[in-house]
Image: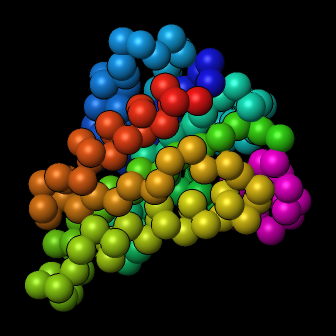
Amino acid sequence: TTQVIVVHGGELARDVAEQVMAQKPNDCSCNVSLRAADDRPKALLDYGKDTLICFVLQTIENGSPTEEGGACVRFFKRKTHAADLLAERFAYSVMGVGDSNLLLDRQTTTAKDCNQVAQAFDARLVALGGKRQCETGLADERTGLTEVEPWIQSFWKSVVAV
């Protein structure tokens, strides 16, 4: 991997994306850049196998993406895409951020319950032939996003290991 692009969809997602960038290990020689999810999502298809795209997507009320994240999510959800659209393109990782405070049953919910956007997006990229670089991360703002830090570490380990 020579290039890592961190794509963020949402205000909270941008904060996490900036943490991903800031924690790039010293022994990683790849270029890292930040990009808004609504900045021409189709242009992401121009990236090849030397690129890893890290999508940080926020889920808001009713399991919806943010306005910014929605543009990217809708682009990849198009039914007209070929099943092998991502087969010879970039590898990817997904980190989801949500807030279980927005759910009715807060007592029994976890990060998994408030990150529908990230989970559905990851499944869609797999369906399009995408190559997942590291396991999808899911974080909950209600519990202080404690899942973010360990995920960022595993993300960068997966980059350096390649």
Q: Position of residue 161 (x, y in %)?
A: 52, 30
Q: Is residue 134 left or right of residue 91?
A: left
Q: Nearer the viewer, residue 112 or 11?
A: 112
Q: How many marks?
A: 0
Q: Which residue does the image show at 37% across and 22% down from the upper left?
A: 24
- State the residue at coordinates (17%, 85%): 108
- The answer, for residue 68, to whether it is visible in the render is no
Residue 51 or residue 116, whichever sits in front: 51
Q: In the drawing, does residue 141 fall left or right of residue 13?
A: left
Taken as a whole, is the magenta stretch helix, strand or loop?
A: loop
Asked if residue 80 is among those painted magenta in the image, a careful observer would answer yes
Closer to us: 96 or 70: 96
Q: Residue at x 43, y 46 (%)?
A: 56
156 up-or-down from 126: above or below: above
**Magenta span includes 1:** no
First to last magenta residue range: 75-87
- The x and y percentages for residue 128 are 76, 59
Left or right side of 53 for 65: left
Q: Position of residue 107 (x, y in %)?
A: 11, 84
